Image (spheres, rainbow, N blue to C red):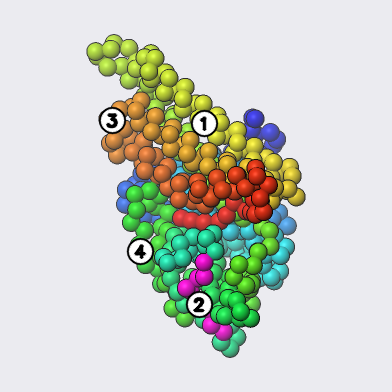
């Protein structure tokens, strides 16, 4: 399938591509230092890119799923780490947009802040002991009711963009109730009672600033309680899981595409004196390039196909869950193989930090950690094929 298909898609792609060119020169510097490129996020906010998934009625683009995935894929061609970071904000905004997700007054207030003042938000649900909340465990972070609101205490991990967020969407345990455990989502403002611990010292996606946040009697007014439910109770359907899975799929696909382009240019121009012609004339090199293209074609077709289906058939989102999981799986795993092939084409030179392949090689591997991880994706796909209950669950939300 070919994109863009209409003027609106072309405009959104042009916005993302222009931003990609602007932020690309900073990517290597911040990756090496492990620092967040604040100026790149300032560029995104100034251009309004952070409003991509805000409904048009609130001043956003109201991007469809296919528009969102196309934009994220294009943005990641400039800086994959920045694209991954903003994906968390865009996914959180999309998840809030369903009519049953947030109290209307809170939703309107926060969307106004996003649009008018550039506020960024992200989910803070994972914990050291809990792991991903997709596993369904009880959060150790607690929320205690006090006059006028709640005091939230605990530690959250993988909180991408933590230094520049205005709000954290925090999952916390309220307490035992009626033989079960009540949990809640709380909108915690970055400020008093919130401490960021710089724990993000990793090999991949180093500039997402996905640090731990420590909550120490962080006060949340009653007006900023997003939802309360019993642990294990199904949550209302929301598009956030699909936005997350397909958005990160687009980011990691872009890494593979970028690596392929580097290898292709190298094959065209590298002419060792012993060979006397470009290495691209060698059948072994040509076969690796062909393999890269086949892998990327397959991943693009499934990823954009899933995004297009969700755009065209929103009422069938639950039934499309296995396809979303498969698209994320293929995009991330194929991108890893493509980068590996690109490294083989370029050879030892690819190991130098002056070459972007070294960064792509590290960053692409982070895709394996994002929900749905491969095993859960396979479980979801297989259960759907077998007609087993629970096969159509959301693809999941997650981190870094």
Residue 12: quarter of image:
top right
According to the image, label 3 marks what residue? 349
- Whichever of callouts 2 and 3 sits on the residue coming sooner in the sequence is 2
Label 4: how many residues lie within 10 Å, few (<14), some (14-19) or many (20+)? Answer: few
- Whichever of callouts 1 and 3 sits on the residue coming sooner in the sequence is 1
Is residue 315 magenta-colored? no
- Vertically, is 299 above or below 130? above
Secondary structure state at the residue bearing disc 1: helix
Label 3: how many residues lie within 10 Å, few (<14), some (14-19) or many (20+)? Answer: some
Q: Residue at x 47, y 22 (%)?
A: 290
- Whichever of callouts 2 and 1 sits on the residue coming sooner in the sequence is 2
Tag nearer the camera, 4 or 1: 1
Give the farthest residue toward the top: 276
- Whichever of callouts 4 and 1 sits on the residue coming sooner in the sequence is 4
**Which of 189 and 172 lies nearest the eye of the viewer?**
172
According to the image, label 4 marks what residue? 198
Image quadrant containing the N terminus: top right
Please state the horizontal and vertical placement of residue 395, each as a whole percent of the image.
59, 51
- Whichever of callouts 3 and 4 sits on the residue coming sooner in the sequence is 4
Q: Residue at x 36, y 14 (%)?
A: 282
According to the image, label 1 marks what residue? 296
**Which of 260 and 180 lies nearest the eye of the viewer?**
180
Can residue 42 be seen? no
Tag nearer the camera, 2 or 4: 2
**Which numbered circle lies on residue 142?**
2
Q: Residue at x 51, y 26 (%)?
A: 294
């Amino acid at each position: 399938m070919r994109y863009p298909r209409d003027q609106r898609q072309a405009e959104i792609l042009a916005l993302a591509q222009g931003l990609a060119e602007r932020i690309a020169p900073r990517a290597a510097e911040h990756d090496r230092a492990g620092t967040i490129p604040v100026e790149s996020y300032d560029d995104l906010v100034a251009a309004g890119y952070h409003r991509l998934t805000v409904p048009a009625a609130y001043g956003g683009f109201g991007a469809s799923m296919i528009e969102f995935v196309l934009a994220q894929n294009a943005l990641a061609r400039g800086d994959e780490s920045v694209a991954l970071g903003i994906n968390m904000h865009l996914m959180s905004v999309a998840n809030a947009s369903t009519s049953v997700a947030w109290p209307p007054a809170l939703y309107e207030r926060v969307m106004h802040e996003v649009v008018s003042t550039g506020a960024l938000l992200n989910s803070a649900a994972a914990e050291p002991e809990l792991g991903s909340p997709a596993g369904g465990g009880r959060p150790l972070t607690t929320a205690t009711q006090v006059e006028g609101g709640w005091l939230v205490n605990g530690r959250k991990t993988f909180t991408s963009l933590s230094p520049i967020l205005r709000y954290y969407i925090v999952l916390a345990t309220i307490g035992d109730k009626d033989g079960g455990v009540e949990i809640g989502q709380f909108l915690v403002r970055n400020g008093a009672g919130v401490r960021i611990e710089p724990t993000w010292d990793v090999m991949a996606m180093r500039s997402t600033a996905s640090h731990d946040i420590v909550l120490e009697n962080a006060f949340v007014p009653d007006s900023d309680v997003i939802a309360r439910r019993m642990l294990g109770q199904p949550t209302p359907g929301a598009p956030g899981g699909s936005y997350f899975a397909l958005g990160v799929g687009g980011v990691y696909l872009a890494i593979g595409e970028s690596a392929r382009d580097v290898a292709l240019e190298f094959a065209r121009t590298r002419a060792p004196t012993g060979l006397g012609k470009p290495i691209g004339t060698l059948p072994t090199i040509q076969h690796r390039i062909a393999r890269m293209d086949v892998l990327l074609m397959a991943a693009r077709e499934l990823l954009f196909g899933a995004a297009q289906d969700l755009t065209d058939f929103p009422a069938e989102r639950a039934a499309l869950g296995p396809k979303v999981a498969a698209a994320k799986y293929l995009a991330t795993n194929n991108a890893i193989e493509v980068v590996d092939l690109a490294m083989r084409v370029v050879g030892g030179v690819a190991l130098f930090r002056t070459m972007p392949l070294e960064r792509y090689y590290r960053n692409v591997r982070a895709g394996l950690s994002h929900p749905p991880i491969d095993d859960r994706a396979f479980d979801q796909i297989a259960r759907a094929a077998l007609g087993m209950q629970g096969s159509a669950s959301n693809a999941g939300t997650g981190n870094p």
